[in-house]
Amino acid sequence: MLLKLKEEWFSNIRGDLLAGLVVALALIPEAIAFSIIAGVDPKVGLYASFSISVIIAIVGGRPGMISAATGAMALLMVTLVKEHGLEYLLAATLLTGVIQILAGTLKLGSLMRFVSRSVVTGFVNALAILIFIAQLPELTHVTWHVYAMTAAGLGIIYLFPYLPYIGKSIPSPLVSIVVLTLAAIFFGLEIRTVGDMGQLPDTLPIFLWPEVPLNLETLMIILPYSVGLAVVGLLESLMTATIVDDLTDRPSDKNRECKGQGIANIGAGLLGGMAGCAMIGQSIINVKSGGRGRLSTFAAGIYLLVMVVFLGEWLQQIPMAALVSVMIMVAIGTFSWSSIKDIKKHPFSTNIVMIATVIVVVATHNLAIGVLVGVLLATLFFAHKIGRFMVVKSRKADEDTRVYEVIGQVFFASSQSFIGSFDFKEAVPRVIIDLDGAHFWDITAVATLDKVVIKFRREGAQVEIVGMSKATETIVDKFGVYNDPEKVEKLMAGH
């Protein structure tokens, strides 16, 4: 236990502390922007980012992953804030946390194994595109100074690591932000800064219990929003955890992450913050800057609070172009460029799932909808593919006996093919259906077997089923009706 604690918290102290500083600087304008999207004061997003980062560092299931206020969650809050106000948003945030803890307790995080690789790739590519699109407002209708600063920032980010001695010891995004801020101040450049995004809070967060009536009416108002926030938050967090797992070659506890996100959102709601979740952009910044352990996430939250409350005057002078260059680096690093090359060699269905996920996410700006569409398509393609691997071979055992040998998986997708493989009009006294090489998966398959047996009997044939595996026998005995005269009569009466 102590060894694991030491590894997760103190195995990379210097790298985690420096990476946390870079993340905190990038979190500030985003937290303000997301607050504006949700229609609340900037401090609501900033307090949320602080509290969620600190709490998730302690209770989360993925060390090194950054969680805070996010755009995907902010979009779901707009109507609630507009119609009912901030207090109801805080109450919805608390309920969101409770739902997520319940999801973790029920081990719903394990469902991530049903998300195919093509969906994850589509999710990553869509997110990279959205991150880049989000920077465009900062690059339109601006002076040439902004483009020069952004280009210089990208140059520092990509070239600084090649410098001997210091290139690998200091995160290049941090160097870029510091250098560009000093340059903007020295040359007195009239460009947009963090201070132009909104007023930074000047006090520490305090405990706040939402001032809403504790009754059924309040529950009915916040429940739909809380369910939506919980689902989107968990989807984005678990997808991000999967990606960070790949980047760091370390597995994570998805069910613990669900509970951790819930605890963090309850903490945010009690400190006057909005609901949040994992951020893939910031998580990648953290990993690329050398952050690996829980200390990086914890430090990011602490740095964020200290900077906005105590160093606000200095912080406000950071040019947005410096942060834009960092986010463009994130977009470039996030996009799976190999997926473009792989289109030629990957199966058509895999490419369709990946491209559909990208299109839906970019079109709706809703990561949850895109992932659900991708998972649905992947499931349909898989069912279709497996359904094709079912064959029924027919042979005559003797003049009076026809043997049908079923091989493969029989379920809803292959049930029609299963029925079509039998010749019911053949005048044969005896039919043997050999299921030794088959597996029946669901009640649709069992119902199909019932139909086959009943049809043969209706034609006057004696039917015998042999070779059932234990699993198939269990489901057929439980749901099959072909040996129950009363049920057969009811079934035939329905036709």
Image (cartoon, rainbow, N blue to C red):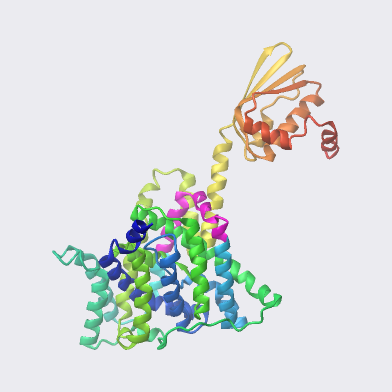
Looking at this view, name the residue that lies furthest to the left.
Answer: 164
**43 is higher (above) or lower (below) than 407:** below
Quadrant showing the C terminus: top right
Does any portion of residue 403 appear in the rendered image?
yes
Asked if residue 122 is among those painted magenta in the image, a careful observer would answer: yes
Residue 254 position, x and y percent, is 47, 56
**463 is higher (above) or lower (below) than 196:** above
Residue 220 position, x and y percent, is 68, 73
Looking at this view, name the residue that lies furthest to the front.
Answer: 2
What residue do we see at 48% from left, 59% from top? Answer: 256
Front-most of residues 236 and 362: 236
Residue 367 position, x and y percent, is 50, 63
In the image: residue 416, left or right of residue 42:
right
**384 is higher (above) or lower (below) than 432:** below
What residue do we see at 82% from left, 36% from top? Answer: 487
Name the image quarter holding residue 311. bottom left
Quadrant showing the N terminus: bottom left
Residue 474 position, x and y percent, is 67, 34
Front-most of residues 267 and 279: 267
Asked if residue 469 is among those painted magenta in the image, a careful observer would answer: no
Magenta stretch, main secondary structure class = helix
Total marks shown come to: 0
What residue do we see at 72% from left, 20% from top? Answer: 431
Does any portion of residue 361 appear in the rendered image?
no
Front-most of residues 6 and 125: 6
In the image: residue 319, left or right of residue 47:
left
**Magenta-highlighted residues:** 103-128
**382 is higher (above) or lower (below) than 418:** below
